[in-house]
Structures are given as C-alpha cells and as structure tokens.
Amino acid sequence: MTVAASVAQNTVESYRKAGQILRESSLRRGNVVYLDTSNTDDVMVTADLHGNRTNFRQILHIADLESNPRRHLVFQEVCHGGPTYPKAGGCMSHLMLEDIAQLVIRFPNQVHFLISNHELAELTDFPIMKAGKMLNLMFRCGMGQMYGDAVPMVRSAQLEFLASLPIAIRIGDQIMVTHSLPKQCDEEPFDTSIFDRELTCHDRSCGGSLHRLVWGRDFRQENVDYLAEQLGVELFITGHEPCQYGFASPNSRQIVLDCCSRLGKYLMIPMSNDLTQEDLLNRIHSLHDPILAAMS
C-alpha cells in the first residue's frame, strides 16, 4: 500500500506547520512550556501510548478541547507499538505521530507534545530493541509501506517536528512535567541549562543532558529531592516507567503515569499553586471503566 503523492505532501506540510507552532508558542520560553492562571483552567496529563489507538481516542474524548478552550492536553511517547501493517508488519505508530501534529495545528497552545526517549531515538537514530524486535526498523518499515518513494521527504519533515518538541511543561510554580528524571543528580548535578538554551547534538546523544533526562529511571528520594532543589519545583509528573495499574508514586515528589494498557491512567490538574502530591493522587483517573478494564 502506497498513498498518493498529495497525501505525502500534506503530511510534510502538517509536520512543518506543527513544528513552527511549537517553536513559536507564546507559552514557551526556551524548551519549557509555562502554564499559569492567565492561560489555563486545568491540564490533562497523559503518558506513554506506544501506538495504542483506543486509548488515544479515549484521551481526546475526555479532554473535549473544543468545549474547554482553557484546558491543556499533554502527550508523550506515542511512537513504537500498537497495530502493524499487514504482510510486511511495519509499525503503524507513525500515523499517531502525524495525528499529534494535526492536533497541534488544530489546537495551538492547547496540545503539548513532550520529547520522550522513543521520539528522541527516532530523532537521533538511537536503536531500541524490545521483545526481540528493532523498534526503529519497524517504524521505518511502516513509513515505507505508507509512503513508498516519498519516505525521505516525509522523514525529513518528521525529524524537523521532533526537533521542535519541548522537554518540559511547567504547571504553576510547583509542578513540572517531564518524560522522566535523570539519574544520580545527587552525585552528578544535572545540567539544567538545557531547559533554557538551544539544544545541541551532544545534548541529544547518548550521555548528553537530554538523553540523560528522558532515559533516566532513578526515582530515589535523594535524587528527586536534589533535582527539585535545582529546578525550584516541588512535584514531578513523568511517564517512561511501565506501571501495572497505570500509575505509581515512587517517592514523595513524583507521580508516574502510564497510558499503554486498558488500565491506563491520566491526571486532570486544576490550575493552582497549592497542590500537594496527595492532591494529585486524588486527581488520577482511569481512561476506561476500571471494572471492565480489569476484566478485559
């Protein structure tokens, strides 16, 4: 299956327009989107989707952005997973990435897409293998099945879009949303300048600051305390870590969300500077009816 050249061109234009919107957003300073009472009523935070089309549709239904113009919706990690194309078996999650770009165009300054380790892997050609499958290769195979000879053109625009993604969302004075947290900040202070300056190839490469941020899994209390002091925040909301029940709270400052499964969870956060971790835990909701999800 190969689509018409006009479809490929439309995809290219969507990626480029969405990337421009993200880069030029009035809410963005450096690589951080800042939300406060002047522009926000509430924020719906989601996490890793990995091509789960059912959960993606449910998120959009719950968010109802058209009826809630001061609601913000945070996505992260949509690549690598979900349905595959017949015969060759290429990954179809590139279509969800295209859907995100179209949502950014449709709801500028409402839809925010954070860089994750899987999107960064696509941007930098960093190989990821899972369950014996090379995810990057399956992703490219899917694009090839869709776009044929137009893949280089679409891929170039796709990478421009990925390079435009913010690395954090700041909700009020106390809450920061990132894909994950860097390891051993209490032993090797994290280079927080990446939140404010233009990113370099070194930042994105293995061992660089952005790579360290989105790949880290150090949820020790000492580590998160040190990072919170560095950044001047109280609470972190992240994804990245698979959660059996759709969320976890591994320390007193962090909530981890997971939207991959039928037990996927999201946060609906009212704009306030007085929220505690307990307040946030009480605002975690299931994407699907929890009884039906547990039975499926």
Image (spheres, helix red, strand yellow):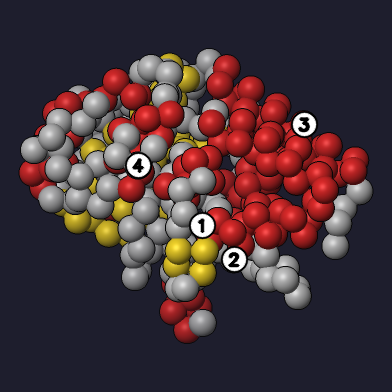
The CA span between labels 3 and 4 is: 30 Å
Q: Which residue is mark 2?
A: 82
40 relative to 213 in the view: left or right:
right
Q: Which x, y percent locates residue 187?
A: 8, 38
Q: Which mark is residue 49?
A: 1
Q: Amino acid at mark 3?
A: Glu
Q: Which x, y percent locates residue 296?
A: 51, 82
Answer above or below: position of 50 versus 174: below
Q: Amino acid at mark 2?
A: Gly
Q: Which residue is mark 4?
A: 206
Residue at (73%, 41%) from the top-left corner?
152
- Asked if the residues shown at circle 2 and circle 1 are in contact, with their CB atoms under 8 angstroms apart, the answer is yes
Q: Amino acid at mark 4?
A: Cys
Residue at (29%, 20%) from the top-left corner?
193
Residue at (68%, 45%) from the top-left corner?
98
The CA span between labels 2 and 3 is: 25 Å
